[in-house]
Image (cartoon, coloured by chain):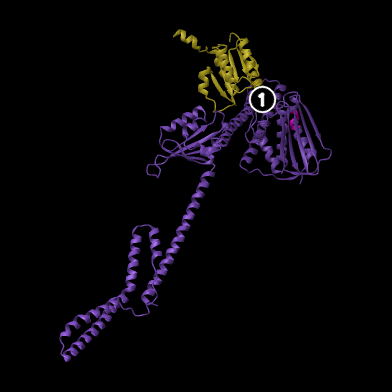
Chain colours: A yellow, B purple
Amino acid sequence: MSKTKKILIAEDSLVLGDVIRFNLQRLGFEVTLARNGNDAFRAVASEHFDVLVTDFEMPGMDGEELCRAVRTDLGLQDIRIVMCSAKGLELDRDELKSRLRIEEILFKPFSIRDLATLLKELVLSPPSNPSQMALTS
Amino acid sequence: MIAAQSYRSLTQRLSEQYFLFGLAGLFCFVLTAVYLSLQGSFLNLSVAAIGIPLGLLLIGSFALRRTSHWHENIERQLTHFANGSADGTGQGAGQSVAALRPLPSVDPFATGWNQLLARVKEHSDWNGVERRLSEALHSQQAKRWEGVFQNLSEGIAICDSDGQIIQLNRSFATLLKRADSKSLVGLKILSLLSDLVDEPSLERIRGLNSCHATQVIEINRSSDLSQGVWRLSRIMQSIDSSNPGDSIWTLRDITQQKLAEKAREQFVFTATHELRTPLANIRAYAETLSLAGDIPPAQQQEFYNTINNEATRLARFVDELLNISQMEAGAITIEKHEIQLDRLLDEILASQRPMSNEKKQTFDYSVAPKLPKVIADKDKLAAALTNLVSNAIKYTPDGGKVTVKVDADASRVLFIVEDSGIGISAEDLPKLCSKFFRSSDERVRAIVGSGLGLAFSQEVARLHGGNISIRSQLNQGSCFTLELPIR
């Protein structure tokens, strides 16, 4: 990694947020922790992040609203998004993934190791930017 | 009586009598002929030849009339009776029987007729009584059915082939919020219903028109379920029925059922969420500890503590689920023993105080100087009180105030839990203790909960012969009082 990759974690549970941050920092990522959707949105708006890891259920702006705001309001197409959720089958996983261009949705309890592997892969692979793809084809 | 006497047929009797008359006539004729021949006046023989038979004929016909008088009478009556019955109505036959007359009882024949008539009349009278009784019964049964129809909880309307209401019961009118059911007769049922439902339901109602089978649909008053959900069914009368083309519509209010279903669904989502959250934390911390060998001991200890706390939270939730499932199954039982109230309270407060401290709340606890002996189920009562205290802490913002007060008099103990929290709206207050209920207030939604704690606590209080009463004002705070009678 030529440059430290920046990751934003939006997670209302401090307990879980802390342990994710602890692990990702050990892997060499620069990690910012936001306790709710609104804080996360302000963070994304003010600085560049490579990956956004967001919880689905959060007080105020929830994960889905945050992703939509990031993609449409801020027009950020190249930030990679990973969503974590304590919900189950009631989420339409494929629909969410394609609509908000979410790389992966992890259901709690997920493995920290899986999350770390996923993030490492994501920051190494180039983002599939639909606007660029439209220009080249 | 009649059978005991020897029976001689009419022909027999007639021929016996006429044989005698014949003999008498012959004897008279021979006597007259002999007398006239002795006198020598044969001229008078022709007079006798005419006069004697004529006289005999008169006497004979008189005798015949006497003999056959009753037969004729009966024959006439029977002919009348036959004509009366011929019109086919039971009424006619009844009148004919009444018209039959008994004969003066002069011979066994007439006596027989009279007795027969008496039997028939008796029978006919019973028939009449029976008919009147059955008519009365029928009208009573019709009234009974009408009563059933009117008082069914399900709304029923009968429509003609044009969809116009012919008849409807009270429940149907009540469901449509009309006090007078008669005012709805003649109205088109579909347009009537269409005015009362939301857009998607309207589509479903329209869908009924094109289909002629028996159909059941659910219609909503609005997108908010609590505004009312109805189950509407339409049964078409078949062509071979007495009223082909008519349709029977039933309308049932299934709002409560729908709300319960939704609440249950919500509960499953909440429960999974509640299970997944501590599990996710436990897994993440355990994995971290096993993966990274170089974590400083102090931090390792912190991680172990977190795992322990999360496991405790999980265990508590599982306990709560267990209590609730028992309550749901109606299998909740209480085992009463004498309990030491002060110790129980200390335990509860010791478990809850840290949460309050974390939120920097003022936590006050006061207790009556002398607490009476209480006979109760220690675990269940502890769970109920813990619910009240932990709710007060959960729904009171940081820096707020929670007060726990225990009062007692000769007959009861009062556990009063008061907070300066977000409070409960007047609208939510009556539903607060119902299973699965959670307020739609965003501040409540932000806090995880199953919506079952209070339902459980109320049930526990009830099983002890007590009660939980709630006072609250939105944004000001709430006061929950669990009253426990002393036995």
Provide the residue designation for mark 1. Answer: B443
What residue lies at 69% left-to-right and 26% top-to-bottom? Answer: B306
Give the residue furthest to the bottom. Answer: B38
Q: Which of the two residues, B459 or B293, is positioned nearer the viewer here?
A: B459
Q: Which of the two residues, B227 or B279, is positioned nearer the viewer here?
A: B227
Chain letter belonging to callout 1? B
- In the depicted structure, whether residue B48 falls above or below residue B398: below
Tell me which amino acid carries mark 1: Arg
What residue lies at 44% left-to-right and 61% top-to-bottom? Answer: B128
Instruction: Point out the stretch of residues depicted in magenta.
Output: B350-354
Estimate the x, y position of residue B19 in percent, counting from the top left. Answer: 25, 82
- In the depicted structure, whether residue B352 falls above or below residue A40: below
Estimate the x, y position of residue B233 in percent, counting from the top left. Answer: 47, 37
Quarter assignment of residue A42? top right
Quarter assignment of residue A70? top right
> On the rendered structure, is B34 left or right of B339?
left
In the image, is residue B352 part of the stretch drawn in magenta?
yes
Estimate the x, y position of residue B235 in percent, counting from the top left. Answer: 44, 39
Q: Secondary structure at mark 1?
A: helix
